[in-house]
Image (cartoon, rainbow, N blue to C red):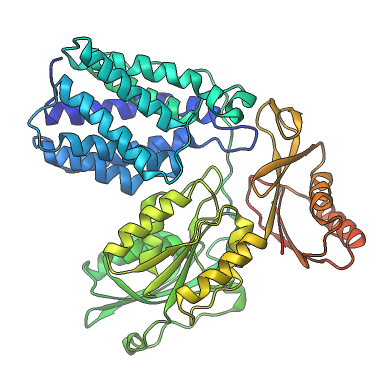
Amino acid sequence: MDKWGPQELASAFRFATDWFGVYVEEVNALNVYPVPDGDTGTNMHLTLQSVRRELDLCDNSKMREVARALAYGSLLGARGNSGVILSQLLKGFSEAVKRADSIGPDLLVKALETGARSAYKAVMKPVEGTILTVARGVAEGARSAQEAGADSIESVLAGALARGRELLEQTPEMLPVLKTAGVVDAGGMGYIRLLEGLEGFVLGRELPEPPKIERRAQEAFEEEEYGYCTEFLMEDVDAPIEKIKELVKPFGDSLLVVGAEGFVKGHIHTNDPDALLAAVARYGKMKRTKVEDMSEQHSEILSAVGAADVPPPPTGLVAVASGWGVIKALRGLGARIVSGGQTQNPSVQDILDAIKSVPNPSVIVLPNNKNIILAAEKAAELAEKEGKKVYVLPTRTMGQGLAAAVLYSPEAEAKELLEEMKEAAEHAVTFEITHASRDAVTEEVGSVQEGQVIGLKDGKLAVVTDNANEALLNLLKLTLDGSDDYEILTLFHSPSVEGEQVEALAEQISNLYPDLEVEVHNGGPDLYDYLAVLE
Protein backbone atom coordinates (compact mmCIF):
# COMPACT_ATOMS: atom_id res chain seq x y z
CA MET A 1 0.00 0.00 0.00
CA ASP A 2 1.54 3.28 -1.15
CA LYS A 3 -0.58 5.66 0.91
CA TRP A 4 -3.47 6.05 3.36
CA GLY A 5 -6.34 8.42 2.80
CA PRO A 6 -8.38 9.53 5.84
CA GLN A 7 -10.78 6.60 5.56
CA GLU A 8 -7.91 4.10 5.38
CA LEU A 9 -6.24 5.75 8.39
CA ALA A 10 -9.45 5.51 10.41
CA SER A 11 -9.95 1.88 9.39
CA ALA A 12 -6.33 1.07 10.25
CA PHE A 13 -6.72 2.36 13.80
CA ARG A 14 -10.02 0.56 14.26
CA PHE A 15 -8.36 -2.69 13.25
CA ALA A 16 -5.31 -1.95 15.41
CA THR A 17 -7.60 -1.43 18.40
CA ASP A 18 -9.08 -4.88 17.86
CA TRP A 19 -5.60 -6.31 17.36
CA PHE A 20 -4.43 -4.75 20.61
CA GLY A 21 -7.45 -6.22 22.36
CA VAL A 22 -6.08 -9.70 21.65
CA TYR A 23 -2.93 -8.88 23.64
CA VAL A 24 -4.36 -6.94 26.59
CA GLU A 25 -3.66 -9.70 29.08
CA GLU A 26 -0.20 -10.31 27.66
CA VAL A 27 0.68 -6.66 28.28
CA ASN A 28 -0.98 -6.72 31.69
CA ALA A 29 1.05 -9.78 32.64
CA LEU A 30 4.29 -7.89 32.02
CA ASN A 31 3.27 -5.17 34.43
CA VAL A 32 3.03 -7.20 37.64
CA TYR A 33 6.47 -6.94 39.28
CA PRO A 34 5.73 -8.29 42.11
CA VAL A 35 3.13 -5.75 43.25
CA PRO A 36 -0.30 -6.33 41.65
CA ASP A 37 -0.16 -3.59 39.02
CA GLY A 38 -1.25 -5.45 35.92
CA ASP A 39 -3.25 -2.78 34.15
CA THR A 40 -1.07 -1.31 31.40
CA GLY A 41 -2.72 -3.35 28.68
CA THR A 42 -6.19 -2.50 29.95
CA ASN A 43 -5.37 1.21 30.18
CA MET A 44 -3.89 1.39 26.69
CA HIS A 45 -6.79 -0.56 25.20
CA LEU A 46 -9.36 1.70 26.86
CA THR A 47 -7.48 4.69 25.48
CA LEU A 48 -7.65 3.22 21.98
CA GLN A 49 -11.32 2.42 22.41
CA SER A 50 -11.90 6.10 23.18
CA VAL A 51 -10.16 6.93 19.91
CA ARG A 52 -12.40 4.50 18.07
CA ARG A 53 -15.48 6.14 19.56
CA GLU A 54 -14.30 9.49 18.23
CA LEU A 55 -13.57 7.97 14.84
CA ASP A 56 -17.10 6.59 14.72
CA LEU A 57 -18.48 10.07 15.36
CA CYS A 58 -16.35 12.08 12.95
CA ASP A 59 -16.37 12.54 9.16
CA ASN A 60 -13.93 9.87 8.00
CA SER A 61 -13.61 11.49 4.57
CA LYS A 62 -11.64 14.43 6.01
CA MET A 63 -8.09 13.98 7.26
CA ARG A 64 -8.39 16.85 9.73
CA GLU A 65 -11.41 15.19 11.36
CA VAL A 66 -9.73 11.80 11.60
CA ALA A 67 -6.55 13.36 13.01
CA ARG A 68 -8.60 15.24 15.62
CA ALA A 69 -10.29 11.99 16.64
CA LEU A 70 -6.88 10.39 17.25
CA ALA A 71 -5.69 13.27 19.43
CA TYR A 72 -8.90 14.26 21.18
CA GLY A 73 -10.23 10.76 21.71
CA SER A 74 -6.98 9.47 23.16
CA LEU A 75 -6.58 12.43 25.54
CA LEU A 76 -10.07 12.29 27.00
CA GLY A 77 -9.98 8.51 27.25
CA ALA A 78 -6.40 8.23 28.51
CA ARG A 79 -5.99 5.97 31.53
CA GLY A 80 -2.88 5.68 33.65
CA ASN A 81 0.60 6.74 32.69
CA SER A 82 0.68 4.39 29.71
CA GLY A 83 -2.60 5.74 28.34
CA VAL A 84 -1.58 9.37 28.74
CA ILE A 85 1.77 8.77 27.06
CA LEU A 86 0.00 6.89 24.26
CA SER A 87 -2.28 9.90 23.85
CA GLN A 88 0.76 12.11 23.39
CA LEU A 89 2.19 9.73 20.79
CA LEU A 90 -1.09 10.01 18.90
CA LYS A 91 -1.24 13.76 19.43
CA GLY A 92 2.11 14.20 17.71
CA PHE A 93 1.10 11.77 14.98
CA SER A 94 -2.10 13.70 14.31
CA GLU A 95 -0.30 17.06 14.27
CA ALA A 96 1.95 15.77 11.50
CA VAL A 97 -0.83 14.46 9.26
CA LYS A 98 -3.85 16.70 9.86
CA ARG A 99 -3.17 19.08 6.92
CA ALA A 100 -2.42 16.34 4.40
CA ASP A 101 -4.78 14.80 1.89
CA SER A 102 -3.11 11.40 2.29
CA ILE A 103 -0.26 9.71 4.17
CA GLY A 104 2.59 8.23 2.19
CA PRO A 105 5.83 6.63 3.41
CA ASP A 106 7.62 9.95 3.99
CA LEU A 107 4.77 11.51 5.99
CA LEU A 108 4.36 8.34 8.04
CA VAL A 109 8.01 8.58 9.06
CA LYS A 110 7.51 12.21 10.08
CA ALA A 111 4.35 11.33 12.03
CA LEU A 112 6.08 8.59 14.02
CA GLU A 113 8.99 10.92 14.80
CA THR A 114 6.67 13.75 15.84
CA GLY A 115 4.74 11.36 18.05
CA ALA A 116 7.89 10.25 19.85
CA ARG A 117 8.99 13.84 20.43
CA SER A 118 5.56 14.76 21.73
CA ALA A 119 5.61 11.88 24.22
CA TYR A 120 9.07 12.71 25.52
CA LYS A 121 8.07 16.36 25.92
CA ALA A 122 4.97 15.45 27.92
CA VAL A 123 6.92 13.56 30.60
CA MET A 124 8.65 15.82 33.10
CA LYS A 125 11.47 13.33 33.80
CA PRO A 126 11.70 10.90 30.88
CA VAL A 127 13.01 7.46 31.86
CA GLU A 128 14.69 5.16 29.37
CA GLY A 129 13.62 1.55 29.32
CA THR A 130 9.95 2.50 28.99
CA ILE A 131 7.45 3.06 26.20
CA LEU A 132 9.38 6.26 25.42
CA THR A 133 12.47 4.25 24.48
CA VAL A 134 10.44 1.97 22.24
CA ALA A 135 8.72 4.96 20.60
CA ARG A 136 12.13 6.47 19.89
CA GLY A 137 13.25 3.16 18.39
CA VAL A 138 10.14 2.99 16.22
CA ALA A 139 10.87 6.48 14.88
CA GLU A 140 14.52 5.58 14.26
CA GLY A 141 13.54 2.42 12.44
CA ALA A 142 11.05 4.26 10.25
CA ARG A 143 13.66 6.86 9.32
CA SER A 144 16.26 4.20 8.56
CA ALA A 145 13.81 2.35 6.33
CA GLN A 146 13.05 5.56 4.44
CA GLU A 147 16.74 6.28 3.95
CA ALA A 148 17.18 2.74 2.67
CA GLY A 149 14.55 3.37 -0.02
CA ALA A 150 11.26 2.27 1.58
CA ASP A 151 8.49 3.22 -0.81
CA SER A 152 5.37 1.85 0.87
CA ILE A 153 3.46 2.05 4.15
CA GLU A 154 4.26 -1.57 4.95
CA SER A 155 7.99 -1.19 4.39
CA VAL A 156 8.15 1.82 6.73
CA LEU A 157 6.16 -0.05 9.37
CA ALA A 158 8.41 -3.09 8.99
CA GLY A 159 11.49 -0.96 9.65
CA ALA A 160 9.81 0.79 12.56
CA LEU A 161 8.81 -2.50 14.16
CA ALA A 162 12.21 -4.09 13.69
CA ARG A 163 14.02 -1.28 15.54
CA GLY A 164 11.22 -0.93 18.08
CA ARG A 165 11.41 -4.63 18.97
CA GLU A 166 15.18 -4.38 19.21
CA LEU A 167 14.97 -1.61 21.81
CA LEU A 168 12.11 -3.35 23.59
CA GLU A 169 14.36 -6.33 24.19
CA GLN A 170 16.97 -3.95 25.62
CA THR A 171 14.62 -2.33 28.15
CA PRO A 172 15.61 -4.73 30.98
CA GLU A 173 19.21 -3.49 30.61
CA MET A 174 18.02 0.10 30.98
CA LEU A 175 15.69 -0.42 33.94
CA PRO A 176 17.01 -2.72 36.70
CA VAL A 177 13.49 -3.35 37.94
CA LEU A 178 12.64 -5.02 34.61
CA LYS A 179 15.79 -7.12 34.62
CA THR A 180 15.12 -8.24 38.18
CA ALA A 181 11.58 -9.32 37.27
CA GLY A 182 12.67 -10.88 33.98
CA VAL A 183 10.30 -8.90 31.76
CA VAL A 184 10.40 -6.25 29.06
CA ASP A 185 8.55 -2.98 29.50
CA ALA A 186 4.78 -3.41 29.34
CA GLY A 187 4.05 -0.03 27.77
CA GLY A 188 6.72 -0.59 25.15
CA MET A 189 5.22 -3.99 24.31
CA GLY A 190 1.83 -2.33 24.07
CA TYR A 191 3.09 0.19 21.54
CA ILE A 192 4.62 -2.60 19.47
CA ARG A 193 1.28 -4.46 19.49
CA LEU A 194 -0.47 -1.30 18.29
CA LEU A 195 1.93 -0.93 15.36
CA GLU A 196 1.58 -4.62 14.57
CA GLY A 197 -2.14 -3.96 14.29
CA LEU A 198 -1.55 -1.16 11.78
CA GLU A 199 0.74 -3.48 9.83
CA GLY A 200 -1.84 -6.24 10.03
CA PHE A 201 -4.43 -3.94 8.45
CA VAL A 202 -2.11 -3.10 5.57
CA LEU A 203 -1.28 -6.77 4.94
CA GLY A 204 -4.86 -7.97 5.33
CA ARG A 205 -4.14 -10.28 8.24
CA GLU A 206 -6.74 -11.97 10.40
CA LEU A 207 -6.82 -11.30 14.13
CA PRO A 208 -4.60 -13.82 15.94
CA GLU A 209 -5.67 -16.03 18.80
CA PRO A 210 -4.99 -14.57 22.27
CA PRO A 211 -1.81 -15.82 23.93
CA LYS A 212 -2.35 -18.44 26.63
CA ILE A 213 -1.92 -16.28 29.72
CA GLU A 214 -3.62 -16.84 33.06
CA ARG A 215 -5.73 -13.85 34.01
CA ARG A 216 -5.61 -12.24 37.43
CA ALA A 217 -9.07 -11.75 38.82
CA GLN A 218 -9.97 -8.32 40.21
CA GLU A 219 -12.80 -7.79 42.56
CA ALA A 220 -14.87 -4.65 42.57
CA PHE A 221 -15.80 -3.41 46.02
CA GLU A 222 -19.45 -3.07 46.70
CA GLU A 223 -20.32 -2.86 50.34
CA GLU A 224 -23.87 -1.53 50.57
CA GLU A 225 -26.57 -0.41 48.20
CA TYR A 226 -27.81 3.19 47.94
CA GLY A 227 -25.62 4.40 50.77
CA TYR A 228 -25.51 8.18 50.25
CA CYS A 229 -28.02 10.99 50.12
CA THR A 230 -26.85 13.07 47.17
CA GLU A 231 -28.07 16.48 46.08
CA PHE A 232 -27.07 18.87 43.33
CA LEU A 233 -28.04 22.26 41.97
CA MET A 234 -27.02 23.29 38.44
CA GLU A 235 -27.48 26.33 36.23
CA ASP A 236 -27.06 26.95 32.49
CA VAL A 237 -28.37 23.45 31.84
CA ASP A 238 -28.28 22.47 28.17
CA ALA A 239 -30.33 19.28 28.36
CA PRO A 240 -34.05 18.58 28.97
CA ILE A 241 -35.12 17.60 32.49
CA GLU A 242 -36.34 14.24 31.23
CA LYS A 243 -32.90 13.44 29.82
CA ILE A 244 -31.26 14.18 33.17
CA LYS A 245 -33.86 12.03 34.93
CA GLU A 246 -33.06 9.12 32.65
CA LEU A 247 -29.36 9.71 33.21
CA VAL A 248 -29.53 9.52 37.01
CA LYS A 249 -32.20 6.82 37.28
CA PRO A 250 -29.78 3.86 37.16
CA PHE A 251 -27.70 5.32 40.01
CA GLY A 252 -30.25 4.63 42.77
CA ASP A 253 -33.69 5.47 44.13
CA SER A 254 -35.56 8.22 46.04
CA LEU A 255 -35.11 10.26 42.91
CA LEU A 256 -36.17 13.89 42.49
CA VAL A 257 -35.15 16.10 39.57
CA VAL A 258 -36.89 19.44 39.04
CA GLY A 259 -36.16 22.55 37.01
CA ALA A 260 -37.05 26.22 37.18
CA GLU A 261 -35.73 29.38 35.52
CA GLY A 262 -32.63 27.75 34.10
CA PHE A 263 -31.80 25.74 37.21
CA VAL A 264 -32.03 22.00 37.78
CA LYS A 265 -32.11 20.56 41.26
CA GLY A 266 -31.77 16.88 41.99
CA HIS A 267 -31.80 14.45 44.88
CA ILE A 268 -31.08 10.72 44.87
CA HIS A 269 -30.04 7.93 47.24
CA THR A 270 -27.08 6.26 45.58
CA ASN A 271 -24.05 4.11 46.31
CA ASP A 272 -21.89 6.08 43.88
CA PRO A 273 -22.53 9.81 44.37
CA ASP A 274 -19.31 10.92 42.74
CA ALA A 275 -20.02 9.14 39.46
CA LEU A 276 -23.56 10.53 39.54
CA LEU A 277 -22.42 14.13 40.08
CA ALA A 278 -19.72 13.78 37.45
CA ALA A 279 -22.30 12.50 34.96
CA VAL A 280 -24.82 15.31 35.47
CA ALA A 281 -22.10 17.99 35.56
CA ARG A 282 -21.62 17.48 31.84
CA TYR A 283 -24.97 19.18 31.21
CA GLY A 284 -24.52 22.43 33.10
CA LYS A 285 -22.59 24.49 35.65
CA MET A 286 -22.62 22.98 39.12
CA LYS A 287 -23.61 25.54 41.77
CA ARG A 288 -24.07 23.50 44.93
CA THR A 289 -23.73 19.86 45.89
CA LYS A 290 -24.16 17.85 49.06
CA VAL A 291 -23.24 14.23 49.80
CA GLU A 292 -24.16 12.76 53.18
CA ASP A 293 -23.80 9.24 54.51
CA MET A 294 -27.24 7.69 55.02
CA SER A 295 -26.12 6.50 58.45
CA GLU A 296 -26.29 10.13 59.52
CA GLN A 297 -29.97 10.08 58.50
CA HIS A 298 -29.67 13.20 56.41
CA SER A 299 -32.52 13.41 53.87
CA GLU A 300 -33.17 17.11 53.39
CA ILE A 301 -33.18 18.31 49.79
CA LEU A 302 -31.50 21.61 48.94
CA SER A 303 -33.90 24.41 49.65
CA ALA A 304 -35.25 26.62 46.94
CA VAL A 305 -33.43 27.67 43.81
CA GLY A 306 -32.50 30.81 45.72
CA ALA A 307 -29.79 28.77 47.42
CA ALA A 308 -27.73 29.43 44.33
CA ASP A 309 -27.46 33.05 45.40
CA VAL A 310 -25.03 32.00 48.14
CA PRO A 311 -21.60 31.67 46.51
CA PRO A 312 -19.67 28.45 47.16
CA PRO A 313 -16.52 28.55 49.31
CA PRO A 314 -13.30 29.22 47.39
CA THR A 315 -11.70 25.77 47.34
CA GLY A 316 -12.92 22.31 46.43
CA LEU A 317 -11.12 18.98 46.78
CA VAL A 318 -11.04 16.01 44.38
CA ALA A 319 -9.34 12.75 45.40
CA VAL A 320 -8.78 9.45 43.61
CA ALA A 321 -9.54 6.52 45.93
CA SER A 322 -10.64 2.90 46.16
CA GLY A 323 -11.96 0.85 49.04
CA TRP A 324 -15.26 1.94 50.51
CA GLY A 325 -13.76 2.70 53.92
CA VAL A 326 -11.05 4.90 52.42
CA ILE A 327 -13.63 6.61 50.22
CA LYS A 328 -15.85 7.24 53.23
CA ALA A 329 -12.96 8.78 55.15
CA LEU A 330 -11.96 11.08 52.30
CA ARG A 331 -15.55 12.03 51.60
CA GLY A 332 -15.95 12.85 55.29
CA LEU A 333 -13.03 15.25 54.94
CA GLY A 334 -14.84 17.04 52.11
CA ALA A 335 -13.38 15.42 49.00
CA ARG A 336 -15.20 14.61 45.79
CA ILE A 337 -14.10 11.09 44.88
CA VAL A 338 -12.91 9.65 41.58
CA SER A 339 -13.06 5.88 41.81
CA GLY A 340 -9.69 4.35 41.02
CA GLY A 341 -6.27 3.40 42.26
CA GLN A 342 -3.78 0.61 41.75
CA THR A 343 -4.83 -1.46 38.68
CA GLN A 344 -7.89 0.78 38.22
CA ASN A 345 -6.50 4.06 36.91
CA PRO A 346 -9.20 6.62 36.09
CA SER A 347 -9.13 8.37 32.74
CA VAL A 348 -8.45 12.04 32.10
CA GLN A 349 -12.18 12.41 31.43
CA ASP A 350 -13.09 10.80 34.77
CA ILE A 351 -10.93 13.30 36.66
CA LEU A 352 -12.09 16.21 34.53
CA ASP A 353 -15.74 15.35 35.19
CA ALA A 354 -15.09 15.30 38.95
CA ILE A 355 -13.33 18.69 38.82
CA LYS A 356 -16.24 20.17 36.90
CA SER A 357 -18.76 18.64 39.30
CA VAL A 358 -17.65 20.75 42.26
CA PRO A 359 -18.92 24.36 42.34
CA ASN A 360 -15.81 25.93 43.89
CA PRO A 361 -13.77 28.28 41.67
CA SER A 362 -10.49 26.61 42.75
CA VAL A 363 -9.93 22.87 43.11
CA ILE A 364 -7.12 20.81 44.63
CA VAL A 365 -6.66 17.33 43.12
CA LEU A 366 -5.07 14.42 45.00
CA PRO A 367 -4.10 11.62 42.52
CA ASN A 368 -2.95 9.29 45.37
CA ASN A 369 -0.99 7.07 42.97
CA LYS A 370 2.16 7.81 40.98
CA ASN A 371 0.56 6.37 37.83
CA ILE A 372 -2.38 8.79 38.01
CA ILE A 373 -0.46 12.06 38.43
CA LEU A 374 -0.02 12.63 34.70
CA ALA A 375 -3.70 12.05 33.97
CA ALA A 376 -4.62 14.46 36.79
CA GLU A 377 -2.34 17.13 35.32
CA LYS A 378 -3.90 16.73 31.88
CA ALA A 379 -7.40 16.99 33.38
CA ALA A 380 -6.32 20.14 35.23
CA GLU A 381 -5.14 21.71 31.97
CA LEU A 382 -8.50 21.03 30.33
CA ALA A 383 -10.47 22.31 33.34
CA GLU A 384 -8.50 25.56 33.44
CA LYS A 385 -9.52 26.21 29.83
CA GLU A 386 -13.12 26.16 31.12
CA GLY A 387 -12.50 28.66 33.91
CA LYS A 388 -11.46 26.51 36.88
CA LYS A 389 -8.22 27.11 38.77
CA VAL A 390 -6.85 23.65 39.46
CA TYR A 391 -3.88 22.60 41.58
CA VAL A 392 -2.58 19.02 41.42
CA LEU A 393 -0.86 18.01 44.65
CA PRO A 394 1.17 15.01 43.41
CA THR A 395 0.35 12.53 46.18
CA ARG A 396 1.86 9.16 45.26
CA THR A 397 0.05 6.93 47.77
CA MET A 398 -3.37 6.72 49.37
CA GLY A 399 -1.76 7.47 52.72
CA GLN A 400 -0.30 10.73 51.47
CA GLY A 401 -3.72 11.71 50.17
CA LEU A 402 -5.43 10.96 53.47
CA ALA A 403 -2.83 12.94 55.42
CA ALA A 404 -3.18 15.90 53.07
CA ALA A 405 -6.99 15.82 53.10
CA VAL A 406 -7.08 16.15 56.88
CA LEU A 407 -5.86 19.73 56.49
CA TYR A 408 -8.33 20.66 53.76
CA SER A 409 -10.76 23.49 54.49
CA PRO A 410 -13.14 24.72 51.79
CA GLU A 411 -13.16 28.22 53.30
CA ALA A 412 -9.40 28.68 52.84
CA GLU A 413 -7.76 29.76 49.60
CA ALA A 414 -6.12 26.94 47.66
CA LYS A 415 -2.67 28.56 47.70
CA GLU A 416 -2.84 28.83 51.49
CA LEU A 417 -3.73 25.16 51.82
CA LEU A 418 -1.22 23.69 49.42
CA GLU A 419 1.96 24.10 51.45
CA GLU A 420 0.43 22.66 54.62
CA MET A 421 -1.17 19.79 52.73
CA LYS A 422 2.07 19.07 50.91
CA GLU A 423 4.03 19.00 54.18
CA ALA A 424 1.51 16.62 55.76
CA ALA A 425 1.64 14.32 52.72
CA GLU A 426 5.42 14.19 52.73
CA HIS A 427 5.55 13.41 56.46
CA ALA A 428 3.03 10.56 56.25
CA VAL A 429 4.21 6.95 55.78
CA THR A 430 2.05 4.51 53.83
CA PHE A 431 2.17 0.75 54.38
CA GLU A 432 0.51 -1.67 51.94
CA ILE A 433 0.27 -5.41 52.60
CA THR A 434 -0.59 -7.52 49.57
CA HIS A 435 0.47 -10.69 47.75
CA ALA A 436 3.09 -11.19 45.04
CA SER A 437 1.47 -12.05 41.74
CA ARG A 438 4.52 -13.77 40.28
CA ASP A 439 7.89 -15.25 41.19
CA ALA A 440 10.72 -12.74 41.11
CA VAL A 441 14.18 -12.02 42.43
CA THR A 442 14.24 -8.50 43.82
CA GLU A 443 17.02 -6.15 44.81
CA GLU A 444 15.18 -5.15 47.98
CA VAL A 445 14.34 -8.48 49.63
CA GLY A 446 15.77 -11.17 47.38
CA SER A 447 13.58 -14.02 46.17
CA VAL A 448 9.80 -13.58 46.17
CA GLN A 449 7.44 -16.45 45.40
CA GLU A 450 4.02 -16.05 43.82
CA GLY A 451 1.38 -15.74 46.52
CA GLN A 452 3.77 -14.68 49.29
CA VAL A 453 2.78 -11.77 51.48
CA ILE A 454 4.74 -8.64 50.65
CA GLY A 455 4.89 -5.33 52.48
CA LEU A 456 5.45 -2.00 50.78
CA LYS A 457 6.58 1.18 52.48
CA ASP A 458 5.64 4.28 50.50
CA GLY A 459 5.18 2.15 47.40
CA LYS A 460 8.54 0.36 47.65
CA LEU A 461 8.93 -3.31 48.45
CA ALA A 462 10.36 -3.64 51.97
CA VAL A 463 9.42 -7.02 53.49
CA VAL A 464 8.31 -10.48 52.41
CA THR A 465 6.68 -12.99 54.77
CA ASP A 466 3.97 -15.64 54.85
CA ASN A 467 1.69 -13.69 57.19
CA ALA A 468 -0.03 -10.33 56.67
CA ASN A 469 0.06 -9.35 60.35
CA GLU A 470 3.75 -10.14 60.54
CA ALA A 471 4.42 -8.06 57.42
CA LEU A 472 2.82 -4.96 58.91
CA LEU A 473 4.59 -5.45 62.25
CA ASN A 474 7.89 -5.71 60.42
CA LEU A 475 7.19 -2.48 58.53
CA LEU A 476 6.36 -0.72 61.78
CA LYS A 477 9.58 -1.99 63.33
CA LEU A 478 11.59 -0.67 60.40
CA THR A 479 9.97 2.74 60.77
CA LEU A 480 9.28 3.28 64.47
CA ASP A 481 12.19 1.72 66.30
CA GLY A 482 14.28 4.62 67.56
CA SER A 483 11.77 7.23 66.30
CA ASP A 484 9.17 9.30 68.14
CA ASP A 485 8.01 11.30 65.10
CA TYR A 486 4.64 9.58 64.76
CA GLU A 487 1.50 9.64 66.88
CA ILE A 488 -1.33 7.97 64.95
CA LEU A 489 -1.65 4.79 62.89
CA THR A 490 -4.81 4.55 60.78
CA LEU A 491 -5.37 0.97 59.65
CA PHE A 492 -7.78 -0.06 56.90
CA HIS A 493 -8.38 -3.76 56.24
CA SER A 494 -10.03 -5.46 53.31
CA PRO A 495 -13.19 -7.58 53.66
CA SER A 496 -11.04 -10.69 53.16
CA VAL A 497 -9.33 -10.20 56.54
CA GLU A 498 -11.19 -11.73 59.49
CA GLY A 499 -12.18 -9.45 62.33
CA GLU A 500 -10.35 -11.56 64.92
CA GLN A 501 -7.13 -11.27 62.92
CA VAL A 502 -7.46 -7.47 62.80
CA GLU A 503 -8.22 -7.24 66.52
CA ALA A 504 -5.17 -9.35 67.35
CA LEU A 505 -2.98 -7.13 65.17
CA ALA A 506 -4.28 -3.91 66.73
CA GLU A 507 -3.65 -5.32 70.21
CA GLN A 508 -0.09 -6.32 69.30
CA ILE A 509 0.63 -2.86 67.90
CA SER A 510 -0.75 -1.15 71.02
CA ASN A 511 1.36 -3.37 73.27
CA LEU A 512 4.53 -2.76 71.27
CA TYR A 513 3.96 0.98 70.84
CA PRO A 514 1.85 2.20 73.78
CA ASP A 515 2.24 5.87 72.79
CA LEU A 516 0.87 5.23 69.30
CA GLU A 517 -2.87 5.79 68.81
CA VAL A 518 -4.33 3.05 66.58
CA GLU A 519 -7.53 3.59 64.58
CA VAL A 520 -9.02 0.57 62.76
CA HIS A 521 -11.46 0.81 59.84
CA ASN A 522 -13.06 -1.70 57.51
CA GLY A 523 -13.20 -1.09 53.77
CA GLY A 524 -9.59 -0.94 52.58
CA PRO A 525 -8.78 -1.36 48.89
CA ASP A 526 -9.46 -4.87 47.67
CA LEU A 527 -5.90 -5.45 46.49
CA TYR A 528 -4.47 -5.10 49.98
CA ASP A 529 -4.96 -7.06 53.17
CA TYR A 530 -3.99 -3.89 54.99
CA LEU A 531 -3.53 -0.25 54.08
CA ALA A 532 -2.02 1.71 56.96
CA VAL A 533 -1.06 5.36 57.34
CA LEU A 534 1.43 6.58 59.93
CA GLU A 535 1.21 10.26 60.86
Is residue 47 visible in the rendered structure shown here? Answer: no
Position of residue 267 measured from the top left corner of the image (x, y, whole percent): 41, 74
Query: In the picture shown, does residue 446 fall above or below 36?
Result: above
Dividing the picture into quadrants, the one containing residue 460 is: top right
Most extreme residue toward the top is 148
Is residue 266 visible in the rendered structure shown here? Answer: yes
Q: Quadrant of the N terminus?
A: top left
Does 21 sit left or right of 237 as displayed?
A: right
Position of residue 279 measured from the top left corner of the image (x, y, whole percent): 36, 61
Dividing the picture into quadrants, the one containing residue 216 is: top right
Position of residue 399 measured from the top left corner of the image (x, y, whole percent): 64, 58
Does 36 sit left or right of 117 as displayed?
A: right
Residue occupying image coordinates x 84% and y 45%? 470
Does 374 sit left or right of 240 as displayed?
A: right
Position of residue 44 measured from the top left corner of the image (x, y, whole percent): 40, 36
Query: In the picture shown, does residue 198 fall above or below 266?
Result: above
Residue closer to the observer: 200 or 214: 200
Residue closer to the observer: 401 or 290: 401
Dividing the picture into quadrants, the one containing residue 485 is: bottom right
Residue closer to the observer: 255 or 132: 132
Residue occupying image coordinates x 74% and y 41%? 462
Q: Quadrant of the C terminus?
A: bottom right
Query: In the picture shown, does residue 208 fall above or below 476?
Result: above
